[in-house]
Amino acid sequence: MSSIRFICQCCSQPLKPYQSTEILGLSTTQRFAVSMLTSAQGQPAGEGVGRTSREETDIEKQQDGASCRPDEGLTSRESSNNFTLLGEFVPMGSLSSIQKVAGDIFDILTGTKEVDHPLCEECTSTLLEQLDTQLTITEHDNQNYRGSLETGKLMSEFAKDMLQMELTGLELEEARLVKELEELEKNGKRATEDLRAAQVETEALDQQEKQNQRVYSELKQQELDLLDELTSVDNRLRYAQTQLEWLQKTNVFSITFDIWQEGPLGVINNFRLGCLPTVPVSWNEINAAWGQTALLLLALSNKIGLEFQRYRLVPCGNHSYLRSLTDDSIELPLFCYGGQSVFLDNKFDYAMMAFLDCMQQFKEEAEKGESGLCLPYRINVKNGLMEDPASGSEYYSIRTLLNTEEQWTKALKFMLVNLKWSLAWVSLRYCQK
């Protein structure tokens, strides 16, 4: 039969008993079981009991031998394979106990039953040390309990009463603290509810704050836009005021009508009025100069509120003319197409004489008042002459009939000088207002 194999239940190491122990375990156990059965059946009870006691003594010796340390001659490996079977020892004093032991041994030998607690030597030592420690602690606790019990017995009645009173006071304090704890729990619940309500209100306020922040941002953007627009308007206003001041200081007539002389010729707005054999001027330029002159006299008369009599000026560029106020069918042209018959054109001469009539009306109106107008050259409307007082009252005809180019050109130059003085007078009076 093969030897029995066990595993340590603590460290799970395989355990192999000594050969002598195996042989002892098999043969002795079998003989012991047979002898127990035989003695129980054929011998008296007293003798069986004595033998049984001896057998128990032998078994105890064998168990003591199995649980003791291995001999000094054994190796460490053999020593680690030693083990101890832990379990309840049942004295075999009766037939039932003997039969149970025999059945257990048979089950162990046949392998149908496992040993409950096989341990190796090291685990057994550790277990014994733990048991000793627990035993020491238990004995110490037992001594403390006994001392407390003896102290309680020796305590006087007065001390017991004091302790009882203290216990009663502590119970009352406990009841008070329990009530206080209940109040605190109620307060805690109320505080929790208040906290939840505050959290809900806080969330609503947060949402309102976000909405207000969006509205504020929109209003801030609108404010910035309005500020930008206001700044732009202020800049434009300052620019307009600057332009207005500049325009108020500007002489509109002087800017619009520029009169000067170029040698013997008078010039208005870059158009020469007159012609000389040495300085030929086209009739288109002369006609345009007459148009600018008519426009200037009409503007000056409108400024002072003068309405002409007998004739009405109609400035139309190089095709300007005068219309009779007594007969609408009569139009006197202030332009000429040129040719050999220029100085024989009576309508052109009549138009220039009518222009001098209008200019004389303006002079008479402007001479009224404290700041009256004083022209450098006199006008003879009836004969169509311009008089120069500085040269000994010489007269120059504005007509082309029976006249020379030099005389006609000088008369036109004197007329432009009078218009320039009139322009300066009106500009000064306009600026004062």
Image (cartoon, rainbow, N blue to C red):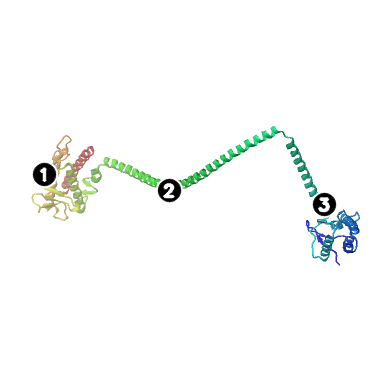
Please state the horizontal and vertical placement of residue 140, each as a whole percent of the image: 77, 42
Give residue 100's position: percent from left, percent from top: 82, 61
Q: For residue 381, which numbered disc appears in the image?
A: 1
Question: From mark 3 to mark 1, how far is it between C-alphas?
Answer: 161 Å
Q: Label 3: which residue?
A: 125
- Note whether residue 200 is visible: yes
Q: Amino acid at mark 2?
A: Gln
Residue 388's image quarter? top left
Q: Image quadrant of residue 78?
A: bottom right
| Residue type marked 1 | Val
What crowding class fits label 3: few (fewer than 14 Cα within 10 Å), some (14-19), or many (20 or more)?
few
Mark found first going from the N terminus, 2 or 3: 3
Q: How many marks?
A: 3
Q: Residue at x 56, y 40 (%)?
A: 179
Q: CA distance from mark 1 to mark 2?
A: 87 Å
Please determine whether, in this image, residue 358 is positioned above or below residue 28: above
**Which quadrant holds the N terminus?**
bottom right
Q: Which residue is mark 2?
A: 211
Q: Residue at x 76, y 40 (%)?
A: 146
